[in-house]
Image (cartoon, rainbow, N blue to C red):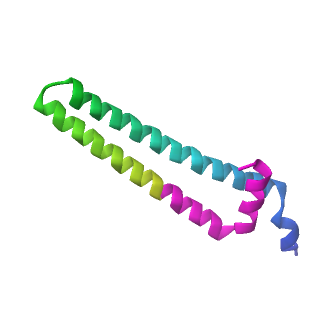
Amino acid sequence: MENSDSSKHDPSNLLTIGRTIMANDRTMLAFFRTSLAFCAAGIGLIKYLDHLAYDVIGWIFIGLACAFLIWGTHRYRHVKRILKAVTPEDQKAAEKEMGL
Protein backbone atom coordinates (compact mmCIF):
# COMPACT_ATOMS: atom_id res chain seq x y z
CA MET A 1 0.00 0.00 0.00
CA GLU A 2 1.40 3.37 -1.00
CA ASN A 3 1.88 6.12 1.54
CA SER A 4 -0.32 9.17 0.85
CA ASP A 5 2.50 11.54 1.89
CA SER A 6 4.84 10.23 -0.80
CA SER A 7 2.20 10.50 -3.54
CA LYS A 8 1.23 13.99 -2.43
CA HIS A 9 4.24 15.57 -4.11
CA ASP A 10 4.56 13.22 -7.05
CA PRO A 11 6.04 15.32 -9.91
CA SER A 12 3.63 13.95 -12.50
CA ASN A 13 0.69 14.78 -10.23
CA LEU A 14 1.98 18.32 -9.70
CA LEU A 15 2.44 18.78 -13.45
CA THR A 16 -1.07 17.52 -14.14
CA ILE A 17 -2.58 19.90 -11.63
CA GLY A 18 -0.43 22.75 -12.96
CA ARG A 19 -1.60 22.09 -16.52
CA THR A 20 -5.21 22.00 -15.36
CA ILE A 21 -4.80 25.31 -13.52
CA MET A 22 -3.24 26.95 -16.57
CA ALA A 23 -5.91 25.48 -18.88
CA ASN A 24 -8.56 27.00 -16.63
CA ASP A 25 -6.78 30.37 -16.84
CA ARG A 26 -6.54 30.12 -20.65
CA THR A 27 -10.23 29.29 -20.86
CA MET A 28 -11.10 32.37 -18.80
CA LEU A 29 -8.94 34.52 -21.07
CA ALA A 30 -10.68 33.06 -24.12
CA PHE A 31 -14.08 33.97 -22.68
CA PHE A 32 -12.78 37.47 -21.94
CA ARG A 33 -11.38 37.83 -25.47
CA THR A 34 -14.66 36.67 -26.99
CA SER A 35 -16.60 39.07 -24.79
CA LEU A 36 -14.35 41.94 -25.80
CA ALA A 37 -14.76 41.10 -29.50
CA PHE A 38 -18.56 40.98 -29.24
CA CYS A 39 -18.60 44.27 -27.34
CA ALA A 40 -16.36 45.97 -29.91
CA ALA A 41 -18.51 44.67 -32.77
CA GLY A 42 -21.67 45.85 -31.04
CA ILE A 43 -20.29 49.33 -30.37
CA GLY A 44 -19.03 49.54 -33.94
CA LEU A 45 -22.43 48.63 -35.36
CA ILE A 46 -24.24 51.12 -33.14
CA LYS A 47 -21.82 54.00 -33.59
CA TYR A 48 -20.88 53.81 -37.28
CA LEU A 49 -23.90 52.37 -39.08
CA ASP A 50 -27.09 54.42 -39.08
CA HIS A 51 -29.89 51.94 -39.37
CA LEU A 52 -32.30 50.56 -36.79
CA ALA A 53 -31.45 46.94 -37.66
CA TYR A 54 -27.75 47.58 -36.99
CA ASP A 55 -28.59 49.24 -33.68
CA VAL A 56 -30.62 46.21 -32.61
CA ILE A 57 -27.90 43.78 -33.69
CA GLY A 58 -25.30 45.93 -31.92
CA TRP A 59 -27.22 45.82 -28.64
CA ILE A 60 -27.65 42.07 -29.03
CA PHE A 61 -23.86 41.76 -29.45
CA ILE A 62 -23.28 43.85 -26.32
CA GLY A 63 -25.74 41.65 -24.42
CA LEU A 64 -23.91 38.54 -25.65
CA ALA A 65 -20.62 40.10 -24.54
CA CYS A 66 -21.97 40.51 -21.02
CA ALA A 67 -23.33 36.96 -21.05
CA PHE A 68 -19.98 35.52 -22.18
CA LEU A 69 -18.13 37.45 -19.49
CA ILE A 70 -20.51 36.31 -16.75
CA TRP A 71 -20.55 32.71 -18.00
CA GLY A 72 -16.74 32.59 -18.30
CA THR A 73 -16.21 34.03 -14.84
CA HIS A 74 -18.72 31.59 -13.35
CA ARG A 75 -17.07 28.64 -15.10
CA TYR A 76 -13.57 29.75 -14.03
CA ARG A 77 -14.60 30.04 -10.38
CA HIS A 78 -16.47 26.73 -10.50
CA VAL A 79 -13.47 24.80 -11.87
CA LYS A 80 -11.12 26.53 -9.43
CA ARG A 81 -13.41 25.55 -6.55
CA ILE A 82 -13.43 21.94 -7.76
CA LEU A 83 -9.63 21.89 -7.99
CA LYS A 84 -9.29 23.23 -4.46
CA ALA A 85 -11.82 20.73 -3.11
CA VAL A 86 -10.13 17.73 -4.69
CA THR A 87 -6.49 18.43 -3.90
CA PRO A 88 -5.81 21.60 -1.91
CA GLU A 89 -2.26 20.61 -0.89
CA ASP A 90 -1.31 19.45 -4.39
CA GLN A 91 -2.70 22.63 -5.92
CA LYS A 92 -0.69 24.85 -3.58
CA ALA A 93 2.46 22.83 -4.28
CA ALA A 94 1.86 22.98 -8.04
CA GLU A 95 1.24 26.74 -7.98
CA LYS A 96 4.42 27.24 -5.95
CA GLU A 97 6.44 24.98 -8.26
CA MET A 98 5.18 26.72 -11.42
CA GLY A 99 5.38 30.25 -10.01
CA LEU A 100 1.65 30.92 -10.24
Give left or right: position of 35 versus 58: right
Give the main secondary structure of the magenta stretch.
helix
Q: Is residue 71 above or below residue 8?
A: above
Figure quadrant of residue 35:
top left
Q: Which residues are magenta?
A: 75-100
Give left or right: position of 40 versus 78: left
The location of residue 55, given as percent across then percent down, is: 17, 34
Give left or right: position of 39 versus 84: left
Residue at left offset 58%, top offset 48%:
25
Outermost residue, left direction? 52
Outermost residue, bottom direction? 1
Outermost residue, front direction? 47
Residue at left offset 52%, top offset 43%:
29
Number of callouts? 0
Give left or right: position of 54 versus 42: left
The location of residue 70, given as percent across then percent down, is: 40, 53
The location of residue 6, given as percent across then percent down, is: 88, 67
Q: Is residue 54 above or below residue 8?
A: above
Figure quadrant of residue 26:
top right
The location of residue 14, given as percent across then percent down, is: 77, 56
Q: Is 85 in the magenta?
A: yes
Q: Is residue 9 above or below residue 66?
A: below
Q: Nearer the viewer, residue 63 or 12?
A: 63
